[in-house]
């Protein structure tokens, strides 16, 4: 009897250890594949477009995220832009497009989302130029025409926002400066205010997440996998790769440092970031603020050309702050 119990205990312990090791392999692969872009291959489809078998394969091996490259240019949108290099304090440089209207309107710095680059912000820039704004579209370090290869989901990108803000202050002295961030770009904007002492005249956010922990949990849910303990393990391995406490990367906490007027957009059909997450960020902002839901919009950029609500809200926001 003791021998049977002993054997079962060994089987249980070995099985538990194997499951624990497998979970760590899955989480480690996910973390490393998310933050290190690859040059070639086919990018993994959206979770909702994957079959059950594909979801299992991706969960075990990790996603394939191609290094974002510029595919569209300002001229495609009728914008007259020049390419510039923005210096960072560590000796590296960021690539950016500048559309300077030489007008008294505000300067809007545009920051893209995860696995994107500055060309993803061109429709937004087109809409802003139509409202009389000069724009600066920035490639975060790690993609586009900037150097590097990878991302920290908005943590170290806050330094890129700070460098871009310093560039704008030096080149347009006395001008009103507005920061515009989509998703990860919004997280970087908020962290730059909280930790890099950036002080813009206004902020516009689209689809911003409230914490890296919550958005990681949502990631596993989208794959049909339990968020616990996988999300905790992913954050652990991601932290080891990045070199910072991933559970401290919380835009809803950064938002408490925001004192300037802020406009927050969120899509009613955003499957990546819930409305409650966006609301958590919004509620933390202590300055004048407005939350706008765009019906039917998912986790994607609002197209200023076809979204009249976006244009009206941004125009009113800019007018109120002038």
Image (spheres, rainbow, N blue to C red):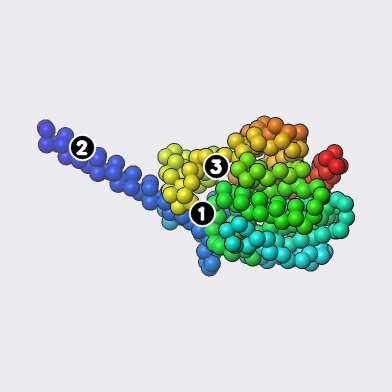
Which quadrant of the rendered structure holds the C terminus?
Answer: top right
Give coordinates of residue 128: x percent, y percent: 81, 52
Give coordinates of residue 81: x percent, y percent: 78, 64
Q: Nearer the viewer, mark 3 or mark 2?
A: 3
Give coordinates of residue 124: x percent, y percent: 76, 53
Out of 23 and 240, give the one closest to the viewer.
240
Q: Residue at x 48, y 56 (%)?
A: 33
Splitting the image into 4 quarters, where does residue 195 fall? top right
Q: Residue at x 68, y 34 (%)?
A: 285
Q: Name the residue under label 1.
A: 34
| In-image side of 167 versus 231 (left or right) | right
Q: Is mark 3 on a helix, strand or loop?
A: loop
Out of 97 and 183, give the one closest to the viewer.
97
Residue 64 in the image: above or below residue 304: below
Q: What element carries label 1?
A: helix
Residue 107 in the image: above or below residue 87: above
Find the residue positioned furthest to the right.
103
Q: Name the residue under label 3.
A: 249
Q: Which of marks 1 and 2 is in front?
A: 1
Q: Can I make out residue 307 in this image?
A: no
Label ID, residue 9: 2
Q: Earlier in the sequence, mark 1 or mark 2?
A: 2
Give coordinates of residue 306: x percent, y percent: 80, 51
| In-image side of 311 versus 294 (left or right) | right
């Amino acid at each position: 009897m003791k021998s049977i119990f002993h054997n079962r205990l060994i089987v249980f312990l070995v099985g538990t250890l194997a499951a624990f090791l497998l979970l760590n392999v899955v989480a480690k692969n996910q973390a490393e594949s998310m933050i290190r872009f690859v040059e070639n291959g086919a990018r993994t489809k959206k979770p909702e477009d994957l079959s059950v078998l594909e979801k299992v394969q991706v969960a075990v091996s990790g996603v394939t995220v191609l290094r974002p490259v510029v595919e569209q240019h300002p001229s495609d949108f009728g914008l007259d832009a020049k390419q510039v290099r923005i210096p960072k304090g560590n000796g590296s440089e960021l690539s950016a497009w500048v559309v300077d209207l030489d007008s008294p309107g505000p300067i809007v710095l545009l920051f893209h989302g995860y696995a994107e680059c500055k060309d993803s912000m061109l429709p937004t820039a087109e809409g802003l130029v139509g409202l009389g704004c000069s724009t600066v579209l920035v490639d975060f370090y790690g993609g586009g025409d900037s150097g590097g290869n990878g991302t920290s989901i908005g943590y170290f990108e806050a330094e890129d926002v700070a460098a871009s803000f310093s560039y704008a202050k030096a080149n347009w002295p006395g001008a009103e400066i507005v920061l515009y961030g989509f998703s990860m770009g919004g997280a970087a904007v908020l962290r730059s205010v909280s930790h890099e002492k950036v002080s813009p005249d206004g902020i516009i956010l689209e689809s911003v997440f409230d914490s890296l922990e919550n958005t990681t949990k949502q990631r596993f849910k989208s794959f049909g996998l339990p968020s616990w303990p996988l999300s905790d393990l992913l954050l652990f391995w991601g932290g080891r790769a990045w070199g910072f406490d991933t559970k401290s990367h919380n835009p809803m906490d950064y938002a408490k440092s925001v004192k300037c007027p802020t406009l927050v957009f969120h899509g009613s059909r955003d499957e990546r970031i819930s409305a409650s997450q966006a609301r958590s960020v919004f509620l933390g902002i202590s300055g004048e603020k407005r939350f706008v839901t765009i019906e039917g919009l998912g986790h994607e950029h609002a197209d200023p050309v076809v979204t009249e609500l976006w244009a009206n809200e941004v125009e009113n926001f800019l007018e109120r702050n002038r």
